[in-house]
Amino acid sequence: MTLKKKKIAQISIILLMVLSLLLSVKFYKVSTDFDKYVENSDLEQKVLESQLSEILYKYDSISIKSKIDSLRFEEQLKLAQTNLFAQKNAKINSIDDAIVNNAKNEQSKKAIGLSVLKAERNTISKIKTSQLTALNVTAKGVKIYSDSYKMSESKIQQLRVCFTLEENQMAHSGNKTVYVQVVNPKNQIISSGNTFIESSNNTKLQYSASVNANYQKKDTDVCTYVDLEKNKTIKGKYKINIYHDFVKIGTTIFEY
């Protein structure tokens, strides 16, 4: 009878150990899935914040110009009112003439200001419509096999980035230099040669690779290779940005 109880106790302990092991595995899987979900959510949020910042920047540039024109008009109106009050002791006919002439001048200035603002908005609209757009951005990891490369190594040495420059009849034809920027999961820009370009207003853009494309206002397929830095090549999600004339024209996510 005692032997039978011992066997039942042993079986119960084994069942409890198996159950605990299954629960531990289930908890680990759920925890891993949750961590991946949080990581994906953070990355998508950063991409959306970047796109929203670009939209707000473009909107603010137009809004600020409108505010400046409004302030200039108010200053001109205050100056005109001051001139009118300074002439309060003049003859009635002179005051009337001054008021009429001043009103005409203000209307003329306002009309000129509106014309300038309209011209600037048209210019901004043309710049937007003439800007290139990169569609179908894709990235693929590449391993280079050679005598110095070990088959057991798991890290990739290059990224093959391809995209399509969208047809745009407003854009200029000719050779276009497009820059590819690769950002690793630690938000580090991969640039083996520390390559960057600088605009006339001292704006700098660090990039990973550049490619020239013969663009003739039609859909143009473009591919290039990005050499990866060994110490910056880690597991996770990479952001691939495409730039032309310091403007981001396309983006995608590559998971390694």
Image (cartoon, grey):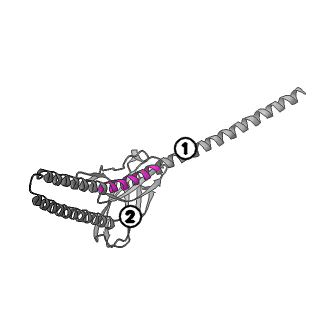
Which residue was labeled with disc 2? 223
90 displayed left or right of 70: left
Q: Residue furthest front?
A: 92
Compared to residue 83, the image places residue 125 above or below, namely below
Q: Nearer the viewer, residue 106 or 200?
A: 106
Q: Amino acid at mark 1?
A: Asp
Residue 49 lies in the magenta-colored region = yes
Query: Residue 31: x and y, percent?
Result: 59, 42
- Magenta stretch mostly in which secondary structure? helix
Q: CA distance from mark 2 to mark 1?
A: 34 Å
Q: Amino acid at mark 2?
A: Cys
Q: Dot 1, crowdedness within 10 Å: few (<14), some or many (≥20)?
A: few
Tell me the magenta residue range: 45-61
Which residue is at a point 18% across and 54% down the rendered structure image? 76
Compared to residue 140, the image places residue 1 above or below, namely above
Identify the disc placed on residue 35: 1
- Does any portion of residue 119 appear in the rendered image? yes
Query: Residue 72: x and y, percent?
Result: 21, 54
36 displayed left or right of 168: right
Q: Nearer the viewer, residue 172 or 256?
A: 172
